[in-house]
Amino acid sequence: MVLGSGTRLLAGAVIVACVVLVGPSTPGGPLFGRSRSVEAVKDVVPNRVMTWNICNPCETSNVDRAAEIARYAPQVIGLQEACVRDVERIRDHLENLHGLVYHVEYGTVLRNWGRCGGVPWNPGAYGQAILSAAPMTGHVAAEYPDGGSEDRGYMAVTTKVGGQSVRVFNTHLAHRRQEAVRARQVGVLAKEVARQDRAIVLGDFNAVPDAPELDGMWALATDADPQCRSSQTGTCETTTDWQTKFDYVFLRGIAPLEHAVHQTEASDHDLFRADLDLA
């Protein structure tokens, strides 16, 4: 059946009205969000990685989160405090609104209705996620034996960065004021990282660079910011709203080319970006 122009206009008006009436796509998040305009990007930056704690629960739309990622178009990004449902929508928005296509793997550690919604008997999954423009293999997701006040864990995948195959880890350590717990968690993670000749470790470590619990990581790797070191003599850019550095791109056997901390209103953590030399 062929529709007349009047019928097509009426159908379009009905669709727009339905969109307005449906309202938010997530609790507390507008359907289209209030994202700032983002310049169109043709493709990801192949040697770029990022880490970002997207903040949960927070009154931020997934359209805004996708826009922040698209602004820098990393080859790989590790997300923390991520609900599976949110990551699915972020991934869709990246493709549909920005033309960026990503694969995804999850490192969920718990199901939590308060953070991720869902029905009471089947709350949403929560934890870490890795988005990669290249396919991922060797996916591992593990909970730490002691998560502290909330279950925590790490995940790992093998994917390509800068055209080279590399093992990528993503983690979120225990909340602040749980130094002993974080030290044990770093011990578990460092043991796995040490198995790799080359590795990228992304995450929110909830600890400042000279915190003793991070010694195990500093013994294996360096931060993508060459000026940021484990000693107090290092100069580290802050990555959180409370003016501390908790977010790291640890590199093992890989050299950094450029890095930046990108401030955002979409989370209480900023995005930490690193461009790498994997030659």
Image (spheres, rainbow, N blue to C red):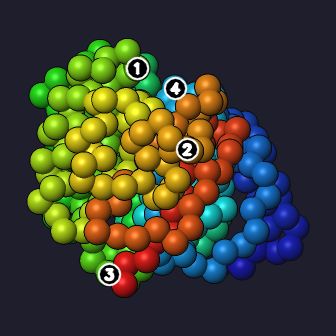
Q: Position of residue 102 (x, y in %)?
A: 44, 67
Front tag of 3 and 4:
3
* Residue that numbered label 1 is attached to: 176
Res 166 quadrant in image: bottom left
Give the percent coordinates (x, y) of residue 178.
Answer: 31, 17
Q: Secondary structure at mark 4?
A: loop
Tell me the SS state at disc 2.
loop
Residue in front for this viewpoint, 124 or 121: 124
Q: Categorize mark 1 by other alpha carbons within 10 Å: few (<14), some (14-19), many (20+).
A: some
Nearer the N terminus, badge 1 or badge 3? 3
Rounded to the nearest angstrom, the CA distance separating label 3 from label 4 is 36 Å
- Residue at 23% across, 20% down: 180
Task: Evaluate whether residue 40 shows in this view.
Answer: yes
Residue type indicated by callout 4: Pro
Q: Earlier in the sequence, mark 2 or mark 4?
A: 4
Q: Nearer the viewer, residue 164 or 228?
A: 228
Q: Residue at x 62, y 30 (%)?
A: 243
Q: Is residue 189 left or right of residue 85?
A: left
Using the image as rendered, state which of residue 29 and residue 71 is in the foreground. 71
Q: CA distance from mark 2 to mark 4?
A: 27 Å
N-terminal of the two: label 2 or label 3? 3
What's the residue at 14%, 51% (across, down)? 192
Q: Which residue is mark 4?
A: 57
Mark 2: amino acid? Cys
State which tag comes first along the sequence, 2 or 1.
Answer: 1
Q: Which mark is residue 4?
A: none
Marks 2 and 1: CB-CB under 8 Å? no
Residue 74 sits above or below residue 123 on the image: below
Q: On screen, 156 above or below 178?
A: below
**Place of residue 94 in the rendered image (x, y in percent of width and height, measured from the top left):** 57, 62
In this figure, which residue is indicated by the disc labeled 3?
164
